[in-house]
Image: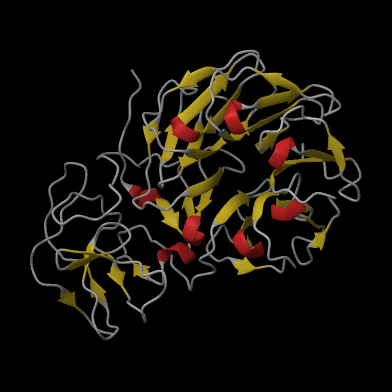
Amino acid sequence: MKRLAGFSPASFVWLGASLFALMVVAGPASALWFAPPPATTNPLNSVSFPRNTSVGYAVGDGGTILKTQNGGANWGFQTSHTANTLNSVCFPSDASIGYAVGDAGTILKTQDGGANWVLQPSNMTVALNSVASPRNTSIGYAVGGGGTILRTTDGGANWGFQASHTANTLNSVCFPRNATTGYAVGGGGTILRTTDGGANWGPLISGTNQDLTSVCFPQDATTGYAVGDGGTILKTANGGASWVLENAGTGNGLTSVCFPQDAATGYVVGEIGNIFKTQDGGATWFIQSFPESLALNAVYFPVNASIGYAVGNGGAILKTTDGGSDLAGGPPVPGPAVAGTYYPVPLEPYPYIVPVPRPEPWPFRFYMGFYYDPWGRRVYYPRRPRWVRPFPGRFPHEGGRREHQGPPHRGGR
């Protein structure tokens, strides 16, 4: 039987826009949750940190491209010259040369770390959902709607169509370690494999009809994982000849999978903020849920299984520096905040919240006369912006803490 563990979100850091215009500051003994002025509220769909944990990129709706040079403490906009949704970003070898793909056949390339992004001709109008380059800045693959597979061998100057022999949407492509053997997954349980650099793509039997959203082969073309709708997690240990269904204990859609170093330790994120981790090759999955119902769309660990990033709707950017190892105890937080419900509280002592003029979308939930923030904590939202904090008090330890019933604490401005 698969074992699920709950979490305490102390080691995940939400870095930015998804805090819905809240600034959270902890006491000296606490982990910090950074909330600089929101970079974007657009959904972020993909994240890439090329070979290091400091310089990274995230892309999303509305042509959004963000870059950080300090491990996610700050994110700045880059000019994409497109309003199309960007679905995937890839920097194959370093932080200079990278590709991004998106809706309406959009392909972008930068050769200077994002200072300039140049549109490349794809001759396609369908959405491109994933781009991969097997540690080679000249060779790249992109997949998308209608079974589209594109390949470049000249750094994106030309993209050629490859026959996939399927009309199903392809959502993810992966070439582990070389440009010869690769995998693509998509709608209706589609899994494709090539062993000749895409000259021929053949179907593999996945054993599921669920849409598959992400595929990862961490070390070589032998052991790999695919995830998708309905909580689907598939594993192969023989290069895709057969796939075994793993059980993470969820029926929610899963959107991205990453095994950063080997086939043992990996992470999966999903539609309602779920984060799952395995340390035994998928035999056991632990819940590391982030306490908010925002969809997480991508997860990426650039160097090892300790430092990783996840991005999602509302501009959410999360970070862990210890592989989420201390995210333990208590069940996942339910979506709507309910008075008297137990919620994990990430900070000790309690965070201070700076209300600002009402943003859109409105981040607080109102229930039975009280406001709740996106983490399920009851907060006081004043008519005039003032420093306030959630209700103080002692809490039980069964999976979280319950808000004190006393009056709100009001501090200085």
Residue pictured at 15% horizontal, 54% vertical: 402
- Residue lying furthest left in this view? 406
Left or right side of 405 for 343: right
Residue pictured at 84% horizontal, 28% vertical: 197
Residue 76 location (% of width, % of height): 61, 68
Q: Which of the 4 quarters of the picture holds residue 189? A: top right
Q: Nearer the viewer, residue 258 or 184?
A: 184
Viewport quadrant of the C terminus? bottom left
| Count of all numbered marks drawn on residues in the image | 0
Q: Is residue 261 visible?
A: no
Residue pictured at 58% horizontal, 65% vertical: 75
Residue 319 location (% of width, % of height): 48, 52
Q: In the rendered image of this protein, does residue 296 appear above or below residue 354?
A: above
Chosen colour scheme? secondary structure
Q: Is residue 369 visible?
A: yes
Viewport quadrant of the N terminus? top left
Q: Which of the 4 quarters of the picture holds residue 199? A: top right
Residue 331 location (% of width, % of height): 26, 39
Q: In the rendered image of this protein, does residue 367 appear above or below residue 166?
A: below
Residue 25 location (% of width, % of height): 34, 68
Q: In the rendered image of this protein, does residue 386 appear above or below residue 62?
A: below
Q: Which of the 4 quarters of the picture holds residue 384? A: bottom left
Q: Nearer the viewer, residue 68 or 129?
A: 129
Left or right side of 81 for 39: left
Q: Nearer the viewer, residue 280 or 195?
A: 195
Residue pictured at 71% horizontal, 33% vertical: 167
Q: Nearer the viewer, residue 73 or 102?
A: 102
Q: In the rendered image of this protein, does residue 244 appear above or below residue 17?
A: above
